[in-house]
Structure formats: C-alpha cells, structure tokens
Image (tube, grey):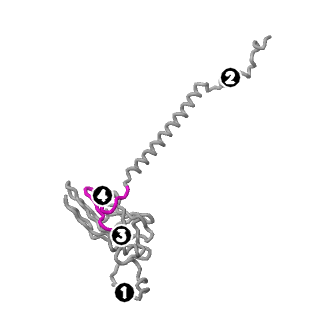
Amino acid sequence: MPVSQVAPPETAAPVLAENPRGPGRLREAAGSVLLLAAVVGALAAGGWGLLSHAGVQEAAPAAMGEAVSAGDGQLVVDRFAPEHMAPMKMGGFAKHGMNMAMPQNMDMAPEGMERYTVDVTLAAGEGGDLKFSEKDFRFGGEGMAEVGPHRSTLGSGSVPAGGVVSGTINVQVPEEAENLTLSFDGGQPVALDAGGGDAEGEAGREDGGSHGH
C-alpha cells in the first residue's frame, strides 16, 4: 500500500477535539481575560487621571504682597518677621557683659520653638461682608504640623463689603521648621519669607532665624 494511503494512527487525532470545553468555550475564556485586562487598565488610567487632576488643582503658594482668594474676599500678607525677642537668647546678652532684666509677664517661646509675626490685610468683595476668625488662619511648613495663631490682634469679626481690615498674627513653630506658609479658610497658601528686606527680617537672619526659604 502506498505511503500516502496509510491511515494516521488514532493517537494523532487533534487534542482539541477531545476537550470537553470545545474551541468555542476556549475562545470565550480568552475573550473574558482580555476584557478583564481592559477594564483593569481603564480603572488604573482613570485613577491616575484623578490623581493628576488633583495635583493640577492644588495651587502653588503665592508670594507675599500678592492677593489670594479668602472666602468672598482676598488676603494679602504684608510682612513676615521674627518676633522682637528671640526665644531663650538671654545667654547671648551675658556673653557681651549685659544684664537684661526681664519683665515677669514676658511671654517667651519655649526652648526649641520660635515665634514670628505676620501682618495681614483682609479685603471684602463688593458682594457682601467677609466674616473671619483667627481660627481661619493656618500655618504649615516642612518639619511641623499645621497650627493656628499663637495670638492675634484680629480676633473674630467681619469686613464690610468693599472694606479692608489689617492685623498682626503671631505664630509659634519648631526651630527646624522650614518653608512656612499661611492660608485662610483652606484657600491658596502664601509663602512666608523672613527676608523681606525690613530691619527685623535682617536681624532675624543674623540671629539664625530664616525660615522663609
């Protein structure tokens, strides 16, 4: 018998023919895997898109002297400088042969902390009054947790429509804190620069108190 007429052995039959699932179900399974992969990819892309969108929406700190949104009005940081008396610096006076008597009611920062004063202006829009509280002011920075004012001349109140009010805020932060910012009611932060060019800012830098990098 010619070789071309020899019947192939039964073991040579296609394996897929004996698969109880059949080629149709295999194709369905493969399609399901591809669909699942596509869904996972879409979800991942969507999540990244949301994160990217959130990053874009997070406003960079404004500069001092620049007006930023504050509720229905605007906030301007006019000045930022170390407090007149640096905390626990009395040893420096003794080194220079000076004896400085401290008032009993002098409120000094504890060791390891520094205080700064911030002059701010709030301006209300023409559409209505701008309500404010010292709790609306929040300070942040590297090496510290977010804090509110240590004390303030503003207290609580409201700025009449079209009007302005100015005040001074005192904040106490760790000595190692850097890149300080101030925000009002969750609005855009303002970068606080102790080197604003005023006399107290210069004194603060000579005293090692530069925190507005």
- The label on residue 171 is 3
Identify which amino acid the numbered label 2 is placed on.
Pro
Residue of label 2:
14
Q: Identify the secondary structure beneath mark 2.
A: loop
Do callouts 4 and 2 mark residues in contact (Cβ within 8 Å)? no
Q: Quadrant of residue 102?
A: bottom left
Disc assigned to residue 100: 1
Mark 2 vs mark 1: which is more N-terminal? 2
Circles 2 and 1, Cβ within 8 Å, touching? The answer is no
Q: Which of marks 1 and 4 is nearer the N terminus?
A: 4
Q: How far apart are marks 3 and 2 (CA)?
A: 82 Å
Dot 2 surroundings within 10 Å: few (below 14), some, or many (20 or more)? Answer: few
Q: Which of 193 and 108 is in front in this view?
A: 193
Marks 3 and 4, how far apart at CA:
20 Å
| Label 4 secondary element | strand
Query: Residue pushed farthest right?
Result: 1
Nearer to us in this view, 147 or 18: 147
- Which residue lies at the image location 39% right of the left edge and 50% below the top edge? 56
Which is more foreground, mark 3 or mark 2? 3
Which residue is rendered at x = 37% and y = 75% of the image? 203
**Distance of label 2 from label 1 (alpha carbons):** 102 Å
Residue drawn at 40 percent across, 77 percent down: 87
Q: Is residue 46 left or right of residue 129?
A: right
Question: In x, y percent, where is residue 188?
Answer: 34, 57
Give the image quarter of residue 146: bottom left
Q: Name the residue under label 4.
A: 68
Which of the 4 image quadrants contains residue 75?
bottom left
For the N terminus, the image quarter is: top right
Quadrant containing the C terminus in the rendered view: bottom left
Q: Give the range drawn in magenta.
A: 60-81
User: Is 60 rendered above or below residue 31?
Assistant: below
- Amino acid type for the residue under numbered disc 4: Val
